[in-house]
Amino acid sequence: MDISSVSLAANSLQPRSVAPSVSNPLETSGQPASSPNNSSSINAGQPDSLPARINDPLSPEAGQRSDNRGDAGSAAQSSGNLAQQRGGDNRADGELELEELSQVRQLSQRDREVRAHEAAHAAAGGSLTGAPSYSYTTGPDGRRYATSGEVSVESPRGSTPEETIERARTVIEAALAPAEPSPQDLRIAAQARAELIAAQAELERSERQQLEQAEQQETAQQPELSLASTATDTESDVSPGAGTNVTTDELTPSVSTERPSQLGTDEELNAAEQREVEQAERAARAEQLQEEQQARQERIAQAQQEFAQELAELNRRIQQVQQQLIETGQVDPLSLLQGSLLDTTA
């Protein structure tokens, strides 16, 4: 409030007092002089009283002194009221400042928690996660504080079962990376876990099919080799002249009669050696196939064991986070029993 307006208002309400006149010039008119007590009052029955006050030479000075005293008192009173009002305002400002400082501290703590939470997601997700984005709240100090945030994550499904398994593991690690995962983080981890289980089953089925196909191919090759070996044996048993009609024109007189016998012996030896080589190759392929089959079975068993351990650890972490959310009241236990949040069964 303006001081001048207070002064004017106080000055307009201040009563004016007129000092009693010592002498009255109108007393010579034959009318009795008014008493000192009646000189400051306006008497409606005496028309001379008002001119007497106006014509009184002492009235203006006395009135001016009275006005000065009234103005000084009004100003002092107004200053006191203003000072008291300012003191109250200062106390109110002090209380509001404490509230603002408390709010700023809360916003600062929330900003740190949100940024650390989203940074953990981004660091664990690697190339599958995007940059964090935040929603801000302006504090009493004019600064912007992050109060919520999110990190985009790609689908864990890949082009092959192996790629899907790798991506699903990365998504699960990213979802559960913060110290206190949110319900949304748990949902993403559960979805990635389902993709991981499906990809692992598909990979095992594909490996079994490859193993069966290799066995079938090996079984199909063995009769062909046996037939080829039998045909070679039959050809080696037939002599050049047995069962055939050979004319004299086809015989060379200079060839010795012992030559065909020698050629037949060499061919038999070569055929026998060829059979031995083929048998050795078949045995080596069979042994190699058996070793590969055993190695695949061992890899499948090891992968299943590792996957079971990984899945058990994942279920343990998810259940632990669920329990924390239930204890803090962020998740309704009935929703977990109904399976609306996520399915904990493998």
Image: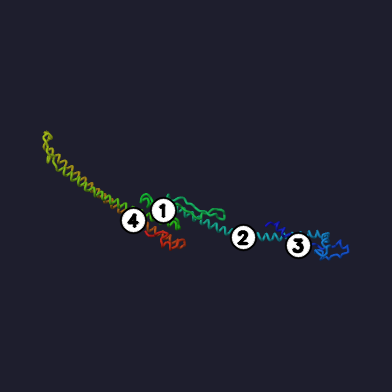
Mark 3 Cα shell of 10 Å, populated few (<14), some (14-19), many (≥20): few
> Which residue type does callout 1 highlight?
Val
Work out whether mark 1 precedes mark 2 in sequence or the reverse, and give the earlier one.
2
Q: How many marks?
A: 4
Where does residue 283 sit, x and y in percent of width and height? 23, 48
Disc 1 marks which residue? 171
Question: Mark 3 = which residue?
Answer: 15
> Which amino acid is tagged 2?
Ala
Q: What colour-coding does the image apply? A: rainbow
- The alpha-carbon separation of the residues under discs 3 and 2 comes to 37 Å
Label ID, residue 92 = 2
**Image point (64%, 61%), residue name:** 88
How far is disc 3 from disc 4 in space, using C-alphas? 105 Å
Q: Earlier in the sequence, mark 3 or mark 2?
A: 3
N-terminal-most mark, 3 or 4:
3
Q: Earlier in the sequence, mark 1 or mark 4?
A: 1
Identify the amino acid type marked 4: Gln
Q: Does residue 48 appear to the left or right of 172 in the view shown?
A: right
Is there CB contact under 8 Å for labels 1 and 4? no
Using the numbered discs, state the Cα–Cα distance from disc 2 to disc 4 in whole angstroms. Answer: 69 Å
Q: Which image quadrant: the C terminus?
A: bottom left
Tell me the mark number nearer the camera, choosing from 3 and 2.
Answer: 3
Mark 3–mark 1 Cα distance, whole angstroms, equals: 87 Å
Find out whether the residues at labels 3 and 2 contact each other: C-beta distance under 8 Å. Answer: no
Residue 231 image position (x, y, % from top left): 18, 44
Check disc 1 and report its element: helix, strand or loop. Answer: helix
Give the residue pinned by disc 4: 304
